[in-house]
Image (tube, rainbow, N blue to C red):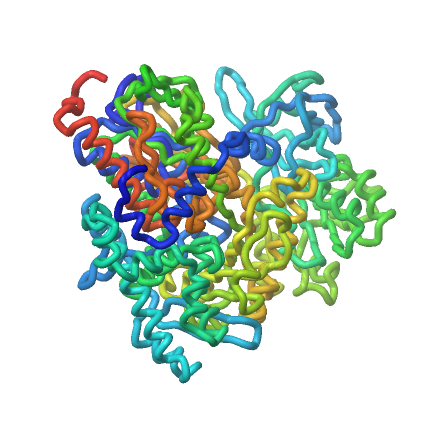
Amino acid sequence: MSASTSTSGVDVVVIGAGNAGLTAAVRLAQSGAATLLLEQHNIPGGCATSFRRGRFEFEVALHQLSGLGTENHPFQIRQLLGELGVLDRLEFVYEPDLYRVTIADLVDVTLPADRTGVVGVLAALHPAESRAVERFLDLVHDVFEEWIAFTYLGGSQLGPDEAKKKYPLFTHYALRTLREVLDELFVSQTLKTVLAAYWDYLGQTPANLAFVDYAVVFEVYLEYKPAHIKGGSQAMSNALLDQFQRLGGEVRFSCGAGAILTEDGHVKAVRTVGGDTISCRAVVSNVSTPVTYGRLLDTGTPAAVAQDLASRPIGVSGCMVYLGLDATPHELGMTTSTSFSFAGFDHDLLGPRRDEIGDPRAIAVTCYSLADPSFSPPGTTHLVIMDLQYSEPWTRLSPSEYLDVKFAYGNKLIDFAERTFPGLRDTIAEADVATPITVMRYLRHPGGAIYGFDQTPSDSALLRSGGVVVPGLYLAGAWTGTGGFQPTLTAGAAAADAVLAAIGRNHLSPPGAPR
Amino acid sequence: MSERTAYDAIDRYTSIAASIAGAQPSEACELRASEPATVIERLHPHRLTLEVTEVISETPTTTTLRMASTGPDLPPFLAGQYVNLFVELDGTRTSRPYAISSAPAERDHYDLTVREVTRGFVSPHLVRRVRRGDRFHSTGPMGEFFRNPLFHGDRLMFLAGGSGVAPARSMIRDITARGGTSRLHLVYGSRDRSDIIFREELDELARAHDTIEIAHVISEPDPGWDGRTGFITGDLIAELAGPHLHRTTYYLCGPPAMYDFCLDALQRLDIARRRVRYEANGPPAEPGRLRGWPGQLDPATTVVVNVDGRGKFEAACGEPLLNSLERAGYQLEAGCRSGHCSLCRVKILSGAVVSGPEARIRRSDEWTGHTHACTAFPVSDVEVQL
């Protein structure tokens, strides 16, 4: 495939080589669509990437891959990667546990990644409420199943009365908050705290989180096990890009999109930042929704989109400390790949704030070398501390304050992690900090948002159509649905399917046709 | 009223949908859409335009170019970081990274201190021919060679050779400006007295601040030199660090030979690897001695580099791919030119390259045949994709 800059026309331009852009590009190329992938950075992946420090390679964003499933018990992502032709080029390792939760010296509980195990651990902790634990897990499971049937198996086409009868738990609980459900089932604050820990992966505390969103995440991890990719998320991004190129797709790195051009309301071309114009029949934008419409689309944000955006606050970003440590996970006291540490019991007091950076209150610690010792050199550990942060307090800093505040906050995160893992700091061999500004720098997302818009009940996919507003323009990524790897990987493939359905597989450029 | 659907069966759906429909569009979202561009332009601009406002002759072979912003303040940086400066010489567009020698607090200009490298391509031009008013483009500040507050501690020793003192000057001025508890001991090796860069300024800072100490070491002293002579040895490091030997963080910056010598000395002193910080300084000088280099292959041997259908050219296999690509007129991103930053990441479609040990290539990049062009030597004909 030629990498020349003379390309003048393709079937589809995909803007952004993040998770969704990559799966969209591969799917399109597989179907014979002449596809050009533009990426402003010099490497594919978006968040799904890594960077080197000294002897270490630091994973940027993937904490626990959900939805993969095992060979014998496969799920969505395994199927998708198989369809895209990259599954056999990737190696996975599984975490035996969901996570460990610690609150100072008061709580230290590890939940295994299987239902019986969870019931066993929590029943031992609070025998009086073991029935409630089972009811919670049943509810998570049932709401998940009913949600699948409602969303993907035609349930949403039923009339309201029939839907209510057929999906009683889903219709009752889906848009209630996680907090309401926990309060309904449990007396023990410890049980609520331990079972709600995954809110950290959704960016909203239990009082602001739709139960259906939490149930989906919890059930997928519990039933299909959390996984890691050997070589990190970059390995998946590289495999997808490699596959795209093998299929004849063309990619341009260090080449951002400057504008999406329309004619008579239909997408007709993309102009690069460098000034090349590539005509196309459709665009898949893996760029954030506000930037796609507000900065790229030549006609500006359509009224229908502006109306939708009016009730969707820009979501949370994060502060990450990436560490390479001169000690084994065992020496550091790491017993699980994933730990959450909280400053208190009530998660709703621990969420990120828009008014101040504050002190760490809730962190996720991911230890990559435990399940996969090859992730870092022998005798060492790679570990990431993640803390949710909104960008506002960071963008308010003056440039002369920024670097000091960044490292000072990184130091606080290490101190906070040391409450669970004492001695961490003394073993640091390499360390770096990322802030919402860093995320903004590499992803160009407003707010440095990592999961798109705030994922409150009002942001639920149940309430946001995500349909095509500008003919020929398809958006895919964290901003068009739930954030995270599983949703964005699947969103890209779905966008490609929608493009193919619209332009018709029989109307693609014949191979070798002049463009 | 529209017909009720299955969605209306979901508790709270109707009320949430009504509040979404009733929300008033505002300009806030449009403003947030332009936020990445404005915020990042302030903190991490892709390119800087710099104008030379002063050319300061430091020594017979070293010049400091004071580079001022042509626009707003320059972006903040960490003492020890560099910018990659773009130049066009004899029709070749290339670049070289230079540590910023001025203090982070001074953001209306960066000082770049350049020493002329014998038979160098870019440095003679910068040292001798640049004039006030000349303009350059550069990257923003980058690099991992800085005092990392997360783990470097407060006891610092900087082992510098030649123009390797440039980042040390920035660190010293940062420490004295902040007035904190960090202490830095500069051990600075020069060939002779006339080679010492920033001598008066640094000695003055050391006199005025008890957190800064400086030891000059001269390898070819004139009869009038009454200071330390020879090289920066393990004995000297141990003597100067005293009881803090194993609680100090060591920074190394200087010519390649000094790295070999000092790294060996620090290892013999049983200094933990994590306490020794250094940054590779350009591609390996002697590619023929790299591990993996084909036994009898003369680095002067010519190979053909094919740029994925765009053209081909001949290059010596002892020249880094990035340099020969630039000479052949190809433009690609570059930053450190030492194998670290990965901005010049390219894919080798066929043929073989040998990379230096300083090349920090991601594991999965190795699986897909990617390399960093700045430290990759083509030891056969190669096909490369930019």
- Residue B22 sits above or below residue A410 on the image: above
Q: Quadrant of the N terminus of chain A?
A: top left
Q: Position of residue B109 (x, y in %)?
A: 71, 29
Decide which of A236, B289 is in the foreground and name it. A236
Q: Residue at x 36, y 44 (%)?
A: A463
Q: Residue at x 48, y 36 (%)?
A: A310
Q: Position of residue B26 (x, y in %)?
A: 52, 31
Decide which of B239, B374 is in the foreground and name it. B374
* Residue A117 seen in the figure: yes
Q: Residue at x 47, y 53 (%)?
A: A203
- Whether residue A450 sits left or right of residue A247 in the image: it is right
- Residue A7 sits above or below residue A475 on the image: above
Q: Residue at x 54, y 45 (%)?
A: A436
Which residue occupies the extreme left position in the image? A506
- Whether residue B245 sits left or right of residue B31 in the image: it is right
* Residue B119 seen in the figure: no
Q: Position of residue B245 (x, y in %)?
A: 69, 63
Q: Quadrant of the C terminus of chain A?
A: top left
**Looking at the rendering, which quadrant does residue A241 occupy?**
top left
